[in-house]
Image (cartoon, rainbow, N blue to C red):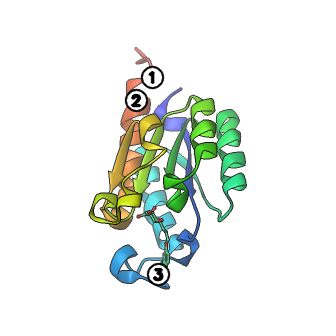
Amino acid sequence: MSAMSAKIFVLNGPNLNLLGTREPHIYGSDTLDDLKSLAQARAAELGLEIDFRQSNSEGELVDWIQEAKESAHGIVINAGAYTHTSIAILDALVATELPVVEVHLSNLFKREAFRHHSYISPVAAGLITGFGPQGYPLALEAMSSILAASTPHSST
Ligand code: CA2
């Protein structure tokens, strides 16, 4: 699969719909729509197509991850607090066999101990944490490199 035509699901978990309305000292003042625009701009430069979604429901996130197996080439995920609790999301990610890049706005390791453990990190290609909204374009760059490395080069 060429990176030029790759489709990436960018999945966001619980409470990320509140971005820009509260806790700007932790999460900044950008809204989720602003993050989507940032991600879309970088995706266009990289030749990626993104499907950017947010849900407060663990089951819906699991459904979307299962859907990605059929219709996407990689997953960028900020699972919010489910990062630290959800074996269901871990199992769904493993089942997709797709490359996964984990992203967090805040630096998990500067925060409470319960945020230091992620069920997702062991199955992710890598983790981007602490760069605020820029984490999304960075995650897409990482995904682009992963896909390019796994794509046989064409001689034409
Ligand atoms: O830093 C991140 O991106 C997190 O995934 C954000 C989650 C948190 O539970 C993770 O430990 C780290 C929380 C997102 C909540 O976002 C809010 C935004 C504005 C107001 C309240 C919550």
Does 99 sit left or right of 53 as displayed?
left
Report x, y in % for residue 124: 44, 38
- The three-letter code of the residue at mark 2 reads Ala
Q: Secondary structure at mark 3?
A: loop
Residue at the left extreme?
A: 110
Q: Secondary structure at mark 2?
A: helix
Label 2 sits on residue: 148
Label 1 sits on residue: 151
Q: CA distance from mark 3 to mark 1?
A: 38 Å
Residues at circles 3 and 1 in contact by the CB criterion of under 8 Å: no
Nearer the camera: disc 3 or disc 1: 3
Q: Residue at x 43, y 77 (%)?
A: 30
Label 3 sits on residue: 20
Does 55 sit left or right of 113 as displayed?
right
Residue at the front extreme?
A: 113
Q: Quadrant of the C terminus?
A: top left
Q: CA distance from mark 1 to mark 2?
A: 5 Å
Report x, y in % for residue 131: 30, 62
